[in-house]
Amino acid sequence: MTATAIDGAAAVRAMVRPPTFPDREFRLAGGGGDHTDAFREAIDACHAAGGGRVVVPPGDYLTGPIRLRSGVDLHVSAGATVRFRREPAAYLPEVPTRWQGVELMGYSPFVYAYGERDIALTGGGTLDGRADDAHWWAWKPLEPADFALLERLVDEGVPPARRVFGDGYHLPPSFVQPYRCENVLISGVTLINSPFWQVHPVLCRNVTVTGVTARSHGHNNDGCNPESCDGVVIEDCHFDTGDDCVAIKAGRNADGRRLAVPCRNIVISDCTFADGHGGVTIGSEMSGGVEHVYASNLRMDSPNLWTCARFKTNSVRGGFIRDVHVTDVTVGRVRDQVLEIDFAYEEGDAGSFPPGVDGIHLRDWRVASTDAPWRLAGYPRGPIGTVTLTGIVIDAARSPAVARDVTDLRLTRVTVNGERLG
């Protein structure tokens, strides 16, 4: 990493500290049947006592939504599996949430917190969303019409509290979503079979995601999506997903501009990436802007990983991406390209808010196999700014690099197919 990136990452780590909890323990009651009430009662008792740890012992537990409260560490022990009910009605009444960057009242995320501080989901256990082609993922063909209605309500100025998308609608909830929370820890758990985005902190401060395995291959099964957050550390995680592995977000279109809250001060380190659309991704919901991202010591390898570093936006989104550093990356196979910056994602150049993308830095990469080294495409009326590639070695690339409408592409010690390009 350069000195700038090292200093930036160190500053983020200095500001992000995992919460601590009183030495007080509550154990979830066992037994068969539905444990929704048992989770609620244990969490409420822990919170009322001043905080501590709610321990889920080894075993199987069926539940509806779990709501975390301030001062509570929900510890899912190794050997414990928490399985979530499949009936959408179990996730009502609706709660304030975000769906693809737009605020609404929707189905409760499976593990949810709103306006809390000092919360955690920890342990070596498994959370199974039990989504499959007959449950939650089956809504895929119905989502576009409902989301179009939601966006129309935004354009008409309907406030979020009146954008109610519960019974009869088909916008599945995130798996784990702290919303407007401060001091959040998610550590050690394995997430499988998610209905939608897996780890999705929204409008939070001071978030640590460590030692998490996100393994789910359904529609929109992104691994970890911090959205409009300030201070996030993602480390020692494994991603094997049906969509982007890590995707940094900041709201979508008019609703994202209404809130205008950037996602900033993000560290991603010592993670592994298998299947996914993108490894380290920013966008496409980035209307509030993304800045100060420091990713390092990453390993990526899968014929089903589309892109290693992926930046996607358009002139409907607007917003900015700046000061992004992705360094010390080892790549086995990647399907499409190592780096993609795409200004024509989804809607293309159909809006009045050309995005600003500048200060994208990749350094010290070793890549075994890819289709193209990079594909960069800005707008003639609003090109991509500075992109630096330093110390990049790509052993085998089947297609040439593409760079269109880029103001300043700098290549230093870049080798592709044995040929030195800069």
Image (cartoon, helix red, strand yellow):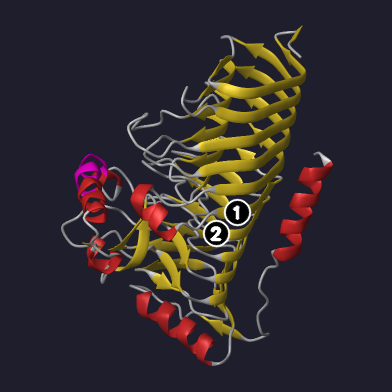
**Camera-nearest residue between 407 and 259:** 407
Residue identified by numbered label 1: 264
Residue 182 showing in the rendered view? yes
Q: Quadrant of residue 23?
A: bottom right
Viewer-closest of 198 and 360: 360
Find residue 201 and report its horizontal and vertical position in percent.
50, 60
What secondary structure characterizes most of the magenta part?
helix
Above or below: residue 243 compared with residue 255? above
Earlier along the polypeptide chain: callout 1 or callout 2? 2
Residue at 32 percent across and 32 percent down: it is: 350
Q: Residue type at mark 2?
A: Cys
Task: Find residue 229 and name its label.
Answer: 2
Q: Is residue 205 left or right of residue 33?
A: right
Q: CA distance from mark 1 to mark 2?
A: 6 Å
Q: Marks 2 and 1: in contact by CB < 8 Å?
A: yes
Q: In the image, is residue 220 above or below residue 18?
A: above
Q: Residue at x 58, y 23 (%)?
A: 406
Q: Which residues are magenta?
A: 140-146
* Residue at (55, 92) in percent of width and height: 49
- The magenta stretch spans residue 52: no
Q: Position of residue 364 (x, y in %)?
A: 77, 29
Quarter of the image for the C terminus: give it.
Answer: top right
- Where is 244 relative to 343, above or below? below
Total marks shown come to 2
Residue 21 in the image: x percent, y percent?
A: 65, 80
As helix, strand or loop, the secondary structure at mark 1 comes to: strand
Mark linked to residue 115:
none
